[in-house]
Amino acid sequence: MAWNGPKWLSSWHNFASEVTNDFSFAERISIADWTLEGDGEEMPGVVFTRDEKLDIARMLDEVGVHRINAGWIASSLPEDDRVVREIAHLGLNAKVEAEAAVSKSHIDSALKADVSNVVMESILTDVSIKSSHLSRNEVMDRSIEITTYAKEHGLQVTFGLVDAPRADQEFLSRFVRSLEREAKADIVCISDSWGVTSPQGFAHLIRMVRGFTRLPIAVHCHNDLGLATANALAGLLAGAAIVTATVNGIGERCGLASLEEVAVALRILYNTDVGIKYDRLCELSRLVEDATGRMISKMKPVVGERAFAWEADQFVQNIRSLGAIGDVKSGLPYQPDFVGADFRCYPAKRIGRAGIQWEAQRFGMKLTDEKAEELAARIRELSKRKHQPSYQEFLMMISMMSKS
């Protein structure tokens, strides 16, 4: 059955006909990574060096991401333009795109950078339009003009509609139809710029936009209420063909939809394979976190340090029992090696002999039952005094005990 994969056991309820009858998945779903774009690098405190950007772009391509937004073009930082051009000349399989303002000079800069696609966006709500001292028609006409200019010069155009969930429906419809019929845009991107939509509401919006246009729809979801991944999935279920995401979910404020969460959820919960190398997701996550510094929670799904970590001996014994009958996945959401992760036993109050011996074995060390129990007692005592060892200290303790 579809819910029983090679390294996971999902729920059959996900594939009940009453559920799947409402699905409108596109024939092919693409991931557009925005880690290097403003939304990724705009996360407070995040700055990527040239070499870090090139390394991240290469690994995104190796993992199989379909589109890479290499960053802002014609920005106030000329070195950013140069890096965008370098990424465009790496010979990647992914389509390399650049973020640009709605401006002919920015389009000219994108052409000089040799990117294949340019991403522009426009404000959409009346409050935002009023604050810019423009009219609705002025905003739309300018967008159509610059999109047409980009198309005439051979660029593909993804046009993003900012804060679309709070926009007037009539204006949204007119804008989308004009992008398709007049400007000949390639993709329209519907952005929940402030994370104010429920999954059900966002699906409703995407279905509505599908009624306005035949253009492929991209979804761009912010995580202000912790629903970016859920909203991205809802948008895809409603027929969007492209999802923008960032590695580790980085981005301004609370971040964006997480690339690894969206990809893994599609594979396990919806039996939809986007064609990436899932077993390199943790490697990709670590590369980005080396560049950003520690930004993600240890408990983050898929790539968090403790995503597959336990302290209780009961779990270790349960996994061993399931392993003995060849059915480890029944005791897990999915096997850690599916995403390039490992089990970890953490030193804390409920640790026991089995967990310590298991962790020692992973690193080629061996502890007798007596030594493992002695170390477990020491860790439990430290934990009671809130001096719980770090994972690195735990490994050092195991090493010292194995040599004693």
Image (spheres, rainbow, N blue to C red):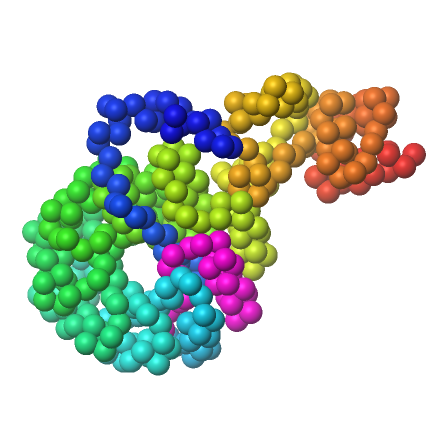
Image spot of residue 86 (x, y percent)? 46, 75
Residue 255 can be seen, yes or no: no
The answer to whether residue 162 is magenta is no
Q: Is residue 369 left or right of residue 58?
A: right
Q: Is residue 53 magenta?
A: yes
**What residue do we see at 69% from left, 28% from top?**
348
Q: Is residue 202 left or right of residue 263?
A: left
Which residue is located at x 48 percent, y 63 percent?
57
User: Left or right: where does residue 128 sit relative to residue 380?
Assistant: left
**Image height of 287 relative to 375, above or below:** below
Span highlighted in magenta in the image: 49-74
Given residues 150 and 330, the one toward you in this image is 330
Of the pair 111 and 64, the residue shown nearer to us: 64
**Placement of the N terminus among the 4 image quadrants:** top left
**Callout count:** 0
Asked whether the viewer can see residue 79, the reply is yes
Q: Quadrant of residue 196?
A: top left
Residue in view at x 31 percent, y 67 percent: 117
Camera-side residue of 43 and 48: 48
Furthest-right residue in this view: 404
Q: Residue at x 32, y 44 (%)?
A: 232
List x then y, in percent, for residue 301: 49, 38
| Location of the C terminus (image quadrant) | top right
Q: Is residue 253 left or right of residue 299?
A: left
The percent position of residue 12, horizontal first and vertical second, equals: 37, 22
